[in-house]
Amino acid sequence: MRLKNTLLIIFALTSALSAQVDITGYYEPQLLGVKIENQFYQLFSNKLRIDLEMNSSENITFKANFDYITYHGYTSWDIKKFLPDNILNEVPDFVVQGVPVNPYQWEFKDRQFLDNAFVKVRFSKFDLTAGKQQISLGTGYVWNPTDVFNRKDVMDPTYEQPGHNALRIDLPLSDKSQIMGLYAPTDKWDSPDLIVKVKSRAGHFDVSLLAIQKQWKFTDARILDFINNKFYQLPVRRRITGFDFAGEIFGLGVWGEFAENHLQIKNSVWLDYEQQLAFSSENNQFEPMAINKQYFEWVFGLDYTFRSQTYIMAEFYQNNSAETDYHNYRFNNWMQYMMAETKTITRNQCYMMIQHPVNDFMTASVSGLYSFSDNSYAVFPTLAYNIFENMDLTLIGNLYFGKKGTAYSENMGSGFLARARVYF
């Protein structure tokens, strides 16, 4: 019934504005297959995306994207199956009215949501964008230390990112320089998310300086709110100063990012956390999470295209707050990584890719991840095929190699992803 009502609203709006609104979109069926603990699981999804765009004048543009996704097959994944045995020893047992419960589940439920909906107004001196919009920061291909709104999928880093509610202003300073300011409200009026970014052209390089304030949360998955079925989240104020650049030198594409993070935790907030932890771990004696209040991240990448159209690239990433020894990975480290609160669980790693066009319609590539910190790695062979004019087919394999407990260990589950996309 909800889907029917939503579609009726969309069709009514688009019919009423059909003379002014451009309506596009796509349908995307996808099959994910993964082998875990000698069992093979599959998850199938259907995604319908409707894109609306209206230019009511030279100064005003409205855009919106509506997504509807259904899931089928194995829709409830036990997170503990991805974790090594030594980490499972840290996982608490939860019992409700004498019945054991497992809250560590990935639940794939049908979703319908407004992914983006914003208006952009062009004034004589600046542009103003208000609403739910995509906010992409940084120049990295796989990792973006300066992007506090998104985390890319290392298997498919170019997939579209979700929208975020914000007010953005873009002000040109000169032909080569501009400043961007962003305000995103949070649950407390006195601690919004703020970004100031100054971008300029210097020779063959685009260079940006950034200052960011972001309300952040660290999940302690050992503390469970049974009433709301949520894990405890420690609120933190995160402040970042950093820069990014992208350009060309000696025929090589070069890019990079740097971000220095400072975390602020109020004493009253930490005291409440310790009390919650003591109450929840009365029989387990849990230690508080170890949080590095000051750390840095950086990315550096290179790419090159040969005359044969073969493309190669490499990107190196370091997160100073992550561990260099996989024996020190803790349960909450894994949970925070899986919940996209951190970009990595291992400190030093790299991404490499080689790509070649098979013909005018097909491209083959092999990419891989390697952790210098725990010697684990993953390989992703990929085939992209423009099968018809308005239809693309993508096949991605994912193979994990590494000792149990490492970042890209066999516990993560090898398998494949098959995706088709039909545009309209």
Image: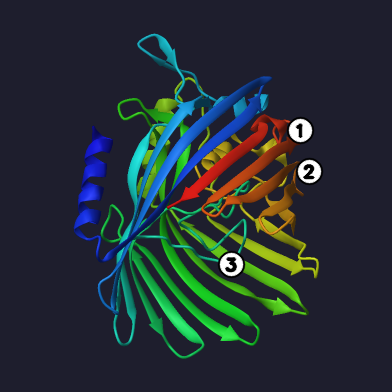
Along the viewing direction, whichever of 325 and 172 lies nearer the viewer: 172
Say whether residue 333 is left or right of residue 247: left
Q: Nearer the viewer, mark 2 or mark 3?
A: 3
Circle 3 Cα neighbour tier, 10 Å, few/some/many (<14 / 14–19 / ≥20): many
Q: Quadrant location of residue 131?
A: bottom left
Q: Residue at x 75, y 48 (%)?
A: 370
Residue 146 rendering spot, x and y as whole percentages: 53, 63
List the residue tagged with mark 1.
403
What secondary structure is found at the residue carrying circle 2? loop
Q: Residue at x 25, y 49 (%)?
A: 10
Q: Point out the image quarter for the N terminus.
A: top left
Along the viewing direction, whichever of 391 and 315 lies nearer the viewer: 391
Hey, what amino acid is under mark 2? Asn
Q: CA distance from mark 2 to mark 1?
A: 8 Å
Q: Nearer the viewer, mark 1 or mark 3?
A: 3
Q: CA distance from mark 1 to mark 3?
A: 32 Å
Can residue 107 be seen by looking at this rendering? no
Hey, what amino acid is under mark 3? Thr
What secondary structure is found at the residue carrying circle 3? loop
Disc ID at residue 139: 3
Which is more N-terminal, label 3 or label 1?
3
Residue 209 rendering spot, x and y as whole percentages: 52, 76
Hey, what amino acid is under mark 1? Lys
List the residue tagged with mark 2.
375
